[in-house]
Amino acid sequence: MSSLINKELRGYLRPDGRKGIRNIVVVAYLVECAHHVAREIVDVFRGRDVQLIGFGGCYPNAYADKMMNALCIHPNVGAVLLVSLGCESFNRKRLYQTVKESGRPVKLLGIQETGGTKKTISEGTAFVSAALEDIKSTPVVDMDVTDIVVGVVSGGSDATSGITANPAVGKAFDILVEKGGTAIFENIGEMIGLDDLIAQRGITPALRDELRKAMEKSAKYYTIMGHGSFAPGNADGGLTTQEEKGMGAYYKGGTALISGMIKPADIPPHKGLYLMDIVPDGEPRFGFPNPNDSSEIAELIASGALCVLFTTGRGSVVGSAIAPVIKVCANPDTYARMQDDMDINAGKVLTEGVSLDEMGNEIFNKIISVAGGEHTCSEALGHQEFVLGYKTFEPVGPSCLP
Amino acid sequence: MSKLMKLNPADNVYIVRVPLQANDSVEIEGQNYLIKQALGFGHKIAATLLHPGDKIIKFGIPIGSATEQINIGEHVHLHNMKSDYLPTYTLNNEFVNK
């Protein structure tokens, strides 16, 4: 471990005690009808730390509500502008109250009440300008590895993902957890057929039961949907079956014991490795659990991930609002083609005989650099994807969080 | 560097470690086998003779079953194996091996 960067980390201290690695102003639309106005406000600040999130639905949804409330007080967020149309179902007053009680500058603008598009853009822009000045005085404090929370997703997987990038991320997770940090993996929907492997890693018998139940729920859900987490590019890249892709995905979680199981926007109560159950509870109601990679990333961030590792074989380019996305490229050919989008070339495991341990160290060091302020490729390229849809969840029981 | 690698000693498939071109040959247990089509990183090649219904083992676990006889050195993919759980979707807008 002597090769690890021993760099001084500084974080933005939030009133709840959590520390952020970025300090951004979030502009959040609360229904699709307010999306354009919110985007126009964000566009005024292109190249500065002002980012767009939102929920498009007009029907109420407890999951989306919880997600938005968690995201608006994420440690990387310094101030929040809420843009409402005025007649949507979203509980804007409660969200406003959540942000206000968190001690952050916040403003709620209703487009109908404010007098339409132009006036709302003008008032919103004024608030964001003032907020950017305001958050310059956010206290900056020492931070160490135990403050770091990292999530992992994969997208555009191919047959190299399970051999290079995913196991290398697993090594980085092992280092992070051993050093007292927090790691979250979530690919429960992919890991069909791996119930025993996952369940046996729970730290208590009750958690092991919960993990097994979640895996069974996932298999049932995807069977009803008639479609696994498998895209045509996966097959072009040499993956043949869901269980093959799932086993490759399994390695992302490293080898640590699983400290608990959370659901989207639950904050891990302790340090350690957590599995996020992203599959809705009850009968399938709103469609595929996560229709794309960005919706998974949003869930990890809502659960407090300060940055997200994204492993890709075919070559995804996405980033995210709120938290930096570190792209770990599994396939050496893809890396050669898409270097500008890739932070790490894990394909070196195949082409240069680099060991997975070395790759794990490199990824861990990258996490530390990015936490220290270094921009990821997707950040530098302006990627700020954000997707939030409808879901239904029961709260996790006490045996999920021993 | 060997063109093929086995990820787990229990596996009955190799994976392609160096992209292969059509008519390349690979050596498996002292015998040479001709590769019929170009195969990118990570594609699977049979390490043993596989019969219909045999489990395909990769990473040391079953990742599906053979749907026809697969000879040593042959490409193992959608055309000759299937999932034991969910059908695989391709851009031909149909499920393979449903």
Image: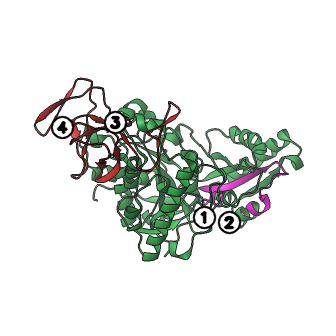
Chain colours: A green, B red
Q: CA distance from mark 2 to mark 1?
A: 8 Å
Q: Name the quarter where the N terminus of chain A is drawn.
A: bottom left
Q: Are marks 2 and 1 in contact (CB under 8 Å)?
A: yes
Q: Amino acid at mark 2?
A: Ser
Q: CA distance from mark 4 to mark 1?
A: 53 Å
Give the residue displayed 51% in from the left and 41% down from the top: A378
Mark 3 secondary-structure assignment: helix
Q: Amino acid at mark 4?
A: Ser
Q: Give a yes or no on whether discs 2 and 3 share a subunit.
A: yes
Q: Nearer the viewer, residue A147 or B20?
A: B20
Q: Chain letter of disc 2?
A: A
- Whether residue A85 appears in magenta in the rendering, the answer is yes
Give the residue at mark 3. Answer: A332
Is B63 displayed left or right of A41 in the figure?
left
Residue A349's spot in the image, x, y percent? 28, 43
Badge nearest the viewer, 4 or 2: 4
Q: Give a yes or no on whether discs 3 and 1 share a subunit.
A: yes
Give the residue displayed 32% in from the left and 56% down from the top: A4
Badge nearest the viewer, 3 or 1: 3
Badge nearest the viewer, 4 or 1: 4
Task: Judge the density around disc 4: few (<14), some (14-19), many (≥20) Cα neighbours within 10 Å.
Answer: few
Give the residue at mark 2. Answer: A102
Q: Which residue extends farthest top?
A: B23
